[in-house]
Image (cartoon, grey):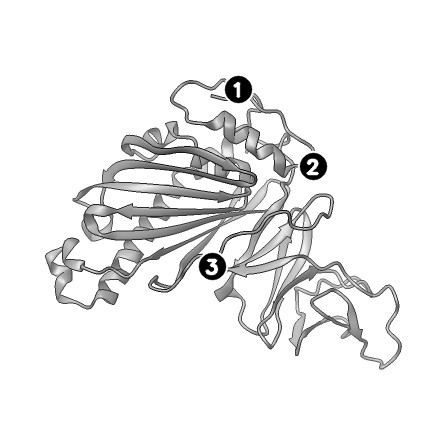
Amino acid sequence: MQTHSTLPYPNGWFAACFSTDLPAGGVLARKLCGHDIVVFRTESGVPAIIDAHCPHMGANMGIGGRVEGEALRCPFHGFRFAPDGGCISTPYGTKIPPKCRVSAWYVREQNGVVLVWHHQRGHRPSFEIPTYELRGWLPLLTRVFTLGTHPQETTENSVDLGHLTEVHNYRDLEILDPLTIDGPYLSVRYAMARSGFGPLRQMQTRAEFRIHVHGLGFSHVEVEVEAMGVQIRHWVLCTPTEGQQCELRVAGSVKLIDRPSRLSPMLSYGPRLAASKLIQRASFHEFCGDLSQDFDIWEHKRHVDLPTLAQGDGPVGRYRQWCRQFYAQVPLVGPTI
């Protein structure tokens, strides 16, 4: 596996877990950009993220720690820490040492995801992730992959139009809205033709994709297959953990289908919810399959700081320039094709 030595950890919002992974009282050990952190949810339902190692004697509180009320109890000696990182009690009933606290991380819980803010220089969040309307949409289906790659590489797929035909066998690519950049937000919309999915595999379909990218850790893809009356959402959430490793979280949802008969006469005999769930499972399986076609490339490619871009690649150069804002040390960028 090649290294990504020219790409340091980026700044931005990254997924720590899906909301369904963290029930009230739940505790998860995580790594983020080389840091050990602990993700927990208080008994009242508030998500919190703090540095994992207890300042008392160094235990990793994500391994064996437990939630008591609105605090996390260290498994080693029982010191308790609030979501702001401050120690609120010792097991001895004695005065809390004045320096007994850990760093707390900025947390947001939106769209079924618990997000954590990372900045190399410790700056406060400089942008936010939008919240999407969830009424009328099915609960998320989710998967997590561990890969040797970097968030800039995975997010670059959004604008690398040349690989869509070569790797994923999409056809008749059409740019509907060109790349738009607004600070940390990037968007593009295009249409492609491909075969259907699941029980609709024999159908040839035209799908429109609108990509919303907020930093390098949060991508939201809206898919519409007008001929089928299907609307799909995908989330692609790449979190750098340690060294060259990332956790790639993906999720998918389908809007409740109004007329299942447009998909297949067989689906017209069942309830809309059952038909919608069938399409959700099939489309998410297909999405994960498409995504996995990139894994070997991501894990074995060498990051080229100054790529020799060609017409037809898509706006990779503009994307690379946009990426510079997420690094304390700015990497090189190539031409702006």
Residue lying farthest to the bottom in this orientation: 93
Q: CA distance from mark 2 to mark 3?
A: 28 Å
Mark 2 lies on residue? 328
**Along the viewing direction, whichever of 2 and 55 lies nearer the viewer:** 55
- Pick the residue in front: 68 or 310: 310
How far across and how far down the image is residue 334, in percent? Answer: 55, 21
First of labels 2, 3 by sequence position:
3
Residue 335: mark in rendering? 1
Type of amino acid under label 2: Ala
Q: Is residue 213 left or right of residue 286?
A: right
Name of the residue lying farthest toward the left:
265
Q: Amino acid at mark 1?
A: Pro
On-image quarter of the N terminus? top right
Q: Separation of disc 2 and disc 1 at Cα?
A: 21 Å
Question: In terms of depth relative to the viewer, which is nearer, 180 or 105?
Answer: 180
> Which residue, given by chain and number where applicable, does mark 3 sit on?
111
On screen, residue 36 above or below 121: below
Q: Residues within 10 Å of mark 1 (few under 14, many from 20)?
A: some
- What is the x, y in percent for residue 27? 61, 67
Category of crowding for the residue at label 2, using alpha-carbon neighbours closer than 10 angstroms: few (below 14), some (14–19), many (at least 20): some
Can you tell which quarter of the image residue 86 is in?
bottom right
Q: Residue at x 20, y 50 (%)?
A: 228
**Residue at horizontal 44 percent and vertical 33 percent from the top:** 179
**SS at circle 1:** loop
Bin the neighbour count of mark 3 within 10 Å (Cα to Cα): few under 14, some 14-19, many 20 and up: some
Amino acid under label 3?
A: Asn
Task: Please count the marks in the image.
Answer: 3
